[in-house]
Image: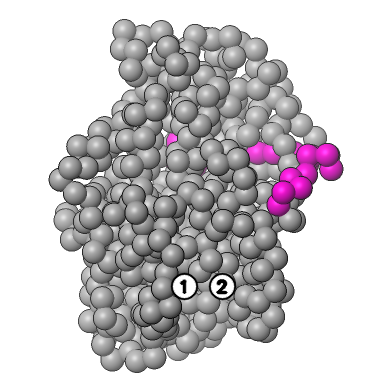
Amino acid sequence: MGGTASLAAAQFLPDGDPHLAAIPRSDEERARIGAATAPATSFDAPENFEELPAGAASVPVPEERDAFRKPSGLVTEDHQMRFTLGEALFEKLWVSAPSSTRASDGLGPLYNARSCAACHIRGGRGHPPEGVDDTGVSLFLRISVPASPEAEMPAIEDWIATEPDPVYGRQLQDFATVGQAAEYRLEVTYEERPIALSGEETASLRAPTYNVKDLGYGPLAEGVMFSPRVAPQMVGLGLLEAIPAADILAAADPDDADGDGISGRAAIAWSRELGRPVLGRFGWKAGEATLREQTASAFSNDIGISSPLSREPWGDCTEAQTACRSAPHGAAEDGLEIEKEPFNAVSYYVANLGVPQRRDLHDPQVLRGKQVFLETGCGACHTPKHVTARLQDRPEASFQLIWPFTDLLLHDMGEGLADGRPEGRATGREWRTPPLWGIGLTQGVSGHTQFLHDGRARSLLEAVLWHGGEAEAQRETVISMPPPDRAALIRFLESL
């Protein structure tokens, strides 16, 4: 993989990792890293250190319900208070201004949730609404309209110009403070699609339709594009941020030069904080460059809270929503509703939620499932191993062998999963490969097994069967493989 296509992407990233204080690798280190991250060739026993998916940052699995709530194993006692403060702010319920508690006001006026934890319950993944009486609190609709050519991003090749809906903004909010009108109500319906599997087994996929009801501010713009997004799990994000951009770019193969059918592309985002192009890593389409920017966007768009990186006190309210913009806000003297130090504490917490240790990795069925996973080609996108950069200022993420099972690249996943809405360089058929570590703990943490960007898959098998596009061949292999191998593959995923 890689080659000239990787060099083309790299020209937009001249410094590689401007968000990291990284120490350059020596030739000896590069050789060691190459050996440590080489694909497995033997499957009669786990690989060295495989039980520690986050290296020394891995944490023991406590009661499964709280498996995603522990600090990284490399959070020192000196930084424990900072983590705890960030956790408290992550879970805090914000209220509308003015209130008697200045530190908690500023909610909305339009919002999707009152706290970060309302969507990422116990650090886990959200789910679509379950029935007409359930809200979409952990799933929202990102929206945009096609933009004129003048809105192109000349600093980034292949940028697809879009802009917010002129009335409804960047995403639809289904809650509002007193005196304001919510933007909409989300209704999701499903069509069942049966699939015949080998060995006379069957599965059924549910294809969602998203209905926008009770629009509060008139019709949406002509040509508006929707993208449903469920809240993802939170563990290991700081480690993903610490993978060198050069390693990610080296795996990119946008023209499929090696002919393996996999053509991952780098998502390059414009960093508001750094004022330059940076490799995109966060969000379902990798539209955010850094964790701090991802955190600021969530505060602004989801809760309506201003921060050092998103200073508008009205959140996602547009100029057309005059009542929203003129409503009271909770800004302190510096004009922010969450100020610099509290925001930094939340960012630290988000970066350092610990990845649980692997379970059952010596189980023969799990070992067979790992072999099936790799031989089927799943590891071509869900890259098992990386080594993080050696960092001067982030000991919690520095120089660790990690097993996130992602290449952090964009891939065409076919028409079945397409949302039809581009974001930055990502087309309406492309998604960033999500990490798989911790995925087997979803039921215990989140109370459900709903996967993919919109929660449509009710099991890991359904998630696999929705794969298309670059993963079409792998999907067909899973459909036709002997049932014991298919069961072993799922058992392996459950052990992650």
Residue at the spot 53% in from the left edge and 24% down from the top edge: 311
Above or below for 136 versus 448:
above
Queried whether the magenta region covers residue 154, the answer comes back as: yes
The answer to whether residue 367 is above or below residue 188 is below
Q: Amino acid at mark 2?
A: Ala
**Badge 1 element:** loop
* Residue numbers of the magenta segment: 137-156
Where does label 2 land, which residue?
251
Going from N to C along the chain, the mark reached first, 1 or 2, is 2
Q: Amino acid at mark 1?
A: Thr
| Residue 5 locus on image (x, y percent) | 69, 71
Image location (x, y in percent) of residue 28: 38, 79
Per the rendering, the mark at residue 415 is none
| Image x and y of residue 88, in percent | 26, 32
Query: Based on the displayed image, in which of its 4 quarters is residue 241 positioned?
Result: bottom left
Q: Is residue 263 left or right of residue 478?
A: right
Residue pictured at 76% horizontal, 31% vertical = 221
Quarter holding the C terminus is: bottom left
Residue designated by label 1: 383
